């Protein structure tokens, strides 16, 4: 199983991309060292810093004809990665 699941393409993280900061959704069991090695191997950049956080699942309610259904979204782990000055990661290069 891959450590990096997908890049975070949000407005907040995209604003930080110019400063060399990128976000990824990662495997819940991955540690900072493994995340650093995976980013360096996949994108060919030098990583300076890795910050991680676990985003908790949110409660969701959906109304149907006769009743309402309650549930919860799954939680996931995010990693914020800072690369060395002058290096970039191009997420849109293969489109």
Image (cartoon, rainbow, N blue to C red):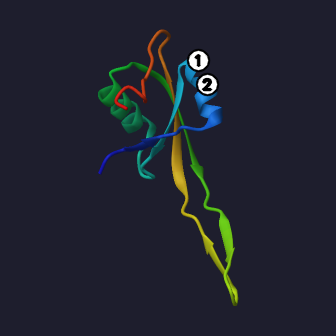
Seen in the picture, residue 29 relative to 20 is either above or below; the reply is: below
Q: Is residue 67 left or right of residue 81?
A: right
Figure disc tally:
2
Dot 1 lies on which element? helix
Residue 37 is situated, as x and y percent measured from the top left of the image, at 34, 31
Q: Which residue of the protein is positioned furthest toward the bottom in this rendering?
A: 66
> Residue 90's quadrant in the figure?
top left
- Crowding around mark 1 (Cα neighbors within 10 Å: few <14, some 14 to 19, many 20+) is some
Between 71 and 52, the one lying in front of the other is 71
> Residue 26's quadrant in the figure?
top left
Seen in the picture, residue 49 relative to 8 is either above or below; the reply is: above
Residue 65 is situated, as x and y percent measured from the top left of the image, at 68, 86
Residue at 61% across / 74% down in the picture?
Answer: 71
- Disc on res. 19: 1
Between 44 and 8, the one lying in front of the other is 8
- Crowding around mark 2 (Cα neighbors within 10 Å: few <14, some 14 to 19, many 20+) is few
Residue at 29% across / 51% down in the picture?
Answer: 1
Q: Quadrant of the C terminus?
A: top left
- Disc on res. 47: none
C-alpha distance separating marks 1 and 2: 5 Å
Seen in the picture, residue 91 relative to 29 is either above or below; the reply is: above
Residue 19 is situated, as x and y percent measured from the top left of the image, at 58, 17
Q: Which residue of the protein is positioned furthest toward the top in this rendering?
A: 86
Dot 2 lies on which element? helix
Residue at 32% across / 21% down in the picture?
Answer: 44
Residue at 37% across / 38% down in the picture?
Answer: 34
Disc 2 designates what residue?
A: 16
> Decide: marks 1, 2 in contact (CB < 8 A)?
yes
Residue 93 is situated, as x and y percent measured from the top left of the image, at 38, 25
């Amino acid at each position: 199983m891959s450590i990096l699941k997908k890049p975070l393409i949000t407005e907040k993280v995209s604003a930080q991309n110019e400063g060399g900061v990128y976000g990824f959704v990662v495997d819940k069991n991955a540690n900072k060292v493994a995340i650093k090695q995976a980013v360096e191997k996949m994108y060919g950049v030098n990583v300076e810093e890795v910050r991680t956080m676990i985003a908790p699942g949110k409660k969701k309610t959906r109304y149907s004809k006769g009743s309402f259904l309650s549930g919860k979204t799954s939680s996931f782990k995010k990693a914020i990665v800072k690369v060395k000055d002058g290096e970039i990661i191009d997420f849109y290069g293969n489109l």
